[in-house]
Amino acid sequence: MPTPLLLKSKSGVTPAQAENEAGGPLSHPLVRSNLVVLNDIGIDYELIFITQTQLKKSIIDATRPVRHLLKTKGIHDYDDQLAGPAHRTYKTTRLACVDGIQTTKASLYRPLAKQKGGDPRLWISKLQDWATPHDILAIFASAGALVVANITKIDYAVPEFRANLEEALGDAIVRTSVAEELLAMLHAVAARGPAPGIRSGDTSIGATLEDLLGIRQNSSRAPDYKGIEIKSARDKRKTRKQLFAQVPDWDSSSYKSINEFLEAFGYERDGVYRLNCTVRATSPNSQMLQLFIDQEKGLLLEGARLPQHKHKYLVWPLNTLLTRLKEKHRETFWVTAESLMIDGREHFQFTTVEHTRSPMANQFAPLVTGGIITLDHMIKRKPSGSAHERGPSFKLESSSLGLLFPPSKVYSLMG
């Protein structure tokens, strides 16, 4: 059983430290303001935290989220790159500066294996002239080139400087009115007053809102409305926020099916053999199940602290989980409603919307390690004898949106 790793977040701090908003680099007023601007522009990006050692040695580690961004945007695939100077590649890079756009180049490479195992790296030419230790850079991909913004030193809320950034991004910017359209629809729903739930139970609020918006319920993994995911919750419940569901990589897992996993850890309740539980990295649950991060291999593992299950895991590649997170929550409306009982039936008065964009993928593993992102199993054996699971579902503590997403916008639906 691997020892749980206390991974560092983008800011170089643990999730517990990250919760202390006053102490982390992402809490700096200029950085927070710039993250709002980046969200408003609406283009995928990742953050790089500059250190004194990086500037001195002209080396930046290409973290897993940065590699994922470059790969999915067709810029560069480190998985296909051989180690050594002969295989180094260069990409045009545009720096969004105060006085306009500076064009330079970035080198993308893997050192020879004897140098830290060929860890993927990058370096941006002229960076020492433009950044200092503890700066935070936002890196984008546009038309085969990299675009870099220094969100610690430049106020991109200033129209002139934002114009420089948007010019550097070019055609990557796709302006849309979908968010405004959906927000108007939600205002119209709220104006009708309390709406009767169309079913009972926890799922009633989501089903009712989708019905009121005219969204047909289906099992699609895609966002709900023209690329925007809609999540709804009752305002007085401190329930965790569901991020996405993702099955394990069965080929890599020790347990080869959900049936096998249920046999190992399930129990009988109300005449049904089932496994309903929450699993976190900070401590084992009643079934002794716990999450672990294998940082070196880029895996999330779920295993039990029991002798008979030693070295046996469910396995998720972190890249798969980051892809699901970004696909599902590129843009999300988190809708809150007041729950009212009228004539013995639950009604919903929708009250607020929190609008998030572009999850900070680098935060996912640290938040798992800190117990802020958890995993839920809801497995039961059907009469046919086969097992069925709604999930596994990855969930975020209700008060922690700000640890996974840049600053959001909150709208009142009342009045």
Image: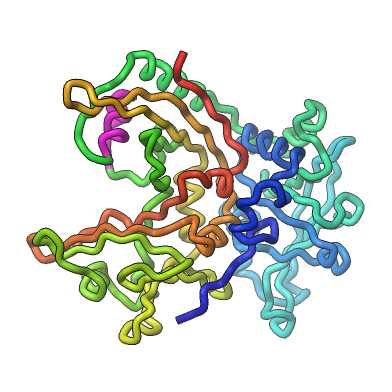
- For residue 105, side relative to residue 10 (left or right): right
Residue 241 visible in the picture? yes
Q: Is residue 9 left or right of residue 101?
A: left
Q: Residue at the location (48% across, 66% down)?
A: 282
Q: Is residue 205 magenta?
A: yes
Residue extending farthest right: 129
Which of these two is toward me, 343 or 123? 343
Give the magenta range.
203-218
* Secondary structure mostly seen in the magenta stretch: helix
Judging depth in this view, the residue of 130 and 310 nearest the camera is 310
Residue placed at 52% from the left, 78% from the top?
A: 3
- Residue 30 in which image quadrant: top right
Identify the image quadrant of residue 6.
Answer: bottom right
Residue 206 vs 130, above or below: the answer is: above
Is residue 358 depicted above or below 284 in this figure? above
Residue 176: image x %, image y %?
A: 55, 27
**From what the image shows, is residue 113 above or below residue 161?**
below
* Image location (x, y in percent) of residue 90: 76, 60
For residue 308: magenta? Answer: no
